[in-house]
Image (cartoon, helix red, strand yellow):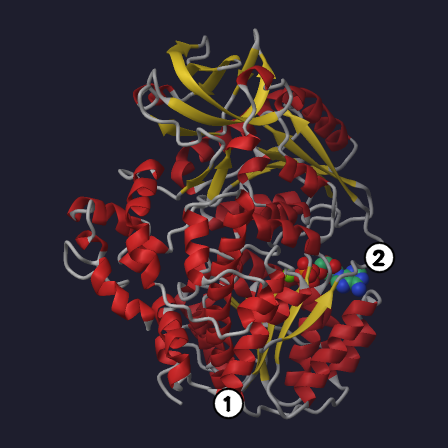
Amino acid sequence: MVARTRSSAAGAGGGVVRLDTPVKFLKGIGERRAESLARLGIATARDLLWHLPHRYVDASAVTPLARAEVGHEVACIGRVVAKRVVPTRRGLRIFHAVLRDDSGLLECVWPGQAFLDRTILVGQTLLVSGPVRFYHGRQMAPREYLVLADAEGEADPLAGGKVLPVYPATEGLSHKVIRTLIERHLDQLIPLAEEAMPPGIRERLALPSVAEALDAVHRPRSAEAAELGRRRLAFDELFDLQLMLTRARLLAKRERGSGVAFVLKKELTSRLRGALPWTLTADQVQAIREVTGDMTASRRMHRLLMGDVGTGKTVVALFAMLLAVENGYQAALMAPTELLAEQHAATLERLLAPLDLRAELLLGKHTPAEKEAVRRKLAQGAARLVVGTHALVQESTVFDRLGLAVIDEQHRFGVEQRGALIGKGAQPDVLLLTATPIPRSLALTLYGDLDVSTLRERPPGRGTVRTALRTANQRDKVFSFVEAEARAGRQAYVVLPVIEESERADLRAASTMAQTLQARWPDLVVGLVHGRMKPAERDATMERFRAGQVHVLVATTVIEVGIDVPNATIMVVEHPDRFGLAQLHQLRGRIGRGTSESYCILLADDAVPERLRAFAGTLDGFRIAELDLTERGMGDLIGARQSGDVTVRHARLPDDTDLLTHARDLARDLLDRDPALHRPENRVLRERALARYPRAVELFRVG
Ligand code: ADP
Ligand code: MG
């Protein structure tokens, strides 16, 4: 309430500024800047105030230029005293800049970035960070640089050992401009932030007030103070998120209600067990028991089966599917790609052959007549099992009696698509599969209404996978090794990244790589697959690789999922730093599927970054999931990008797991007492959650 009365005073001079005032009405921000700010998601004064630095530069962590040692990663600050663009013999243009500070000089080089000549100017003070190497002298190849001051006269914002906030910036709006804008409005805006945290909690969690927190993140006295401020704001964000998720769960549970109580008839399920070519792992047995328990209960199953690649999720899903079928229902398995769907279909075909059963396959690429035929069988109930892609959720697909929906790689589907498949039946049971393991505590928090089964153990008899880190100057040795292995009868993948912005150049790199290798080994067969090939062509090459007719397969990430070639024991990954860790882990899962030892070789461009060392040091998918989580933040994990209804910007996991747990418990308590947040004392909380999450509007509309 205090904020209300103060806000008019704060706005003196212009109109009254409130938190929902559009930024273009703030001093120093016109239409143009407002447009740039909009690109950062900043529309109102509130957004500006909550636009937090994504990192801090702490003067005490900066290395004097003279002490930047070869072989280390450092951050330095210096004034640009000279610069030039140097062409190399290979046509690459390198931008050089020499920095000076009180201790001495350091040369910085940016290969292939001659354009920096237009933005980096003599006289500017730069912060640079990156590895230092030796090349005619000490040289840094900055991974990142930041202009701290433009001209000699301008004060160095780090002078006096300060902690400098660095804000996410955008084109036409440098981090410096943003910093200045925010600084200018802080005194006016901070008092408008209402304290919404229920009393007592702040003390319990030792967090600052919201006003203190905002002040600390924007004007930190120390890195620790900034971090404490961030934690407070992260807590608010997680709390709002938990309010929303808990509420969504509440409504979902009300709706979920009861489903089919299947009966374990031990017909098809027992026959499958008897016909399996191998013994189930203990984890598989346990997962099947859990799934059976859910399906035979009258409440609907809503279970997530989590397990690294190769842990054998498909057979668990098949048990569930057969349980539905032996009760006279249909079961569907939906996969995110045609390749994956085909692989599942092949697996099912093998496992089902002794049972005289088969699964239909429904893919977008099939002819209209083929699709029509499958759809007719599904509608009439003649087909009991179906595997497919999104084609399954199209309107024209109708089931006679869908009892179980299995969704593979569930995070790759949007909420709507999952909902659409589930909606094809009357209260079908749901089994979600994921090869992206997440720590159990997090799984419970994020998917609180899901029951979770985990496969940790890999089926026995597999060779181990060793991960080696090499750099570009060892490339020749690496490929000699690949050759030797190929001549000894094994097969190899060579993986290259394709990122969207430079897709064309990346695809060219992949085909050049294939040609180069083919020229190097005229008597071996080198294949190439990438995402832009015609599916038929790509599948043909994959098939030849599977059949052992292709020795080395150059590929982009299309092999990430869905290919299972036990004889492939080597994987070379080029530019590994351009992959996410979870993605690398998925890739690595493509080898080590046979009985021999496998090798995953990461061929880094330059110095091997720490993240790759950590990756190489473990095969544990849960550990990697944690590392990946730290790298990407939580937004990605909970599918914010896909569904667009949840964003987490301030929280960092797993560091903030404690906050998450508290937020969840508190949100539950609160909603137990006030399910739709209608009470006056919860008004501020309700408003904050609504402002943050558009989806909350619909969730809290009704009581
Ligand atoms: P994922 O969990 O990655 O989906 P799959 O279900 O595709 O794994 O199984 C990987 C491979 O392991 C398949 O070829 C499958 O037939 C095989 N497999 C599954 N369970 C076992 C087991 N208990 N023993 C031996 N091989 C198994
Ligand atoms: Mg699978």
Specify which label sits upstream in the sequence, 1 or 2: 1
Instruction: Determine whether 432 is above or below 476 in the image.
Output: below
Residue 254: which disc?
Answer: 1
On whether ligand 1 comes within 8 Å of the CB at mark 2, the answer is: yes
Query: From the viewer's perspective, is 615 left or right of 537?
Result: right
Give the Cα separation between the discs numbered 1 and 2: 43 Å
On whether ligand 2 comes within 8 Å of the CB at mark 1, the answer is: no
Q: Position of residue 354 (x, y in %)?
A: 75, 73
The answer to whether the residue labelled 1 contacts the one labelled 2, judged by CB atoms less than 8 Å apart, is no
Q: Position of residue 697 (x, y in %)?
A: 35, 76
* Rendering quarter of residue 19: bottom left
The N terminus: image quadrant = bottom left
Instruction: Determine whether 443 is above or below 598 in the image.
Output: below
Q: Position of residue 327 (x, y in %)?
A: 65, 90
Pick the front one: 254 or 365: 254
Label 2, on which residue?
460
Image quarter for ligand 2: bottom right
Pick the front one: 32 or 221: 221
Q: Secondary structure at mark 2?
A: loop
Q: Position of residue 444 (x, y in %)?
A: 63, 71
Residue found at x 33% / y 45%: 183
Look at label 1 and name its amino acid. Answer: Arg
Task: Please say whether residue 366 is visible from this viewpoint.
Answer: no
The C terminus: image quadrant = bottom left
Query: From the viewer's perspective, is 301 left or right of 92?
Result: right
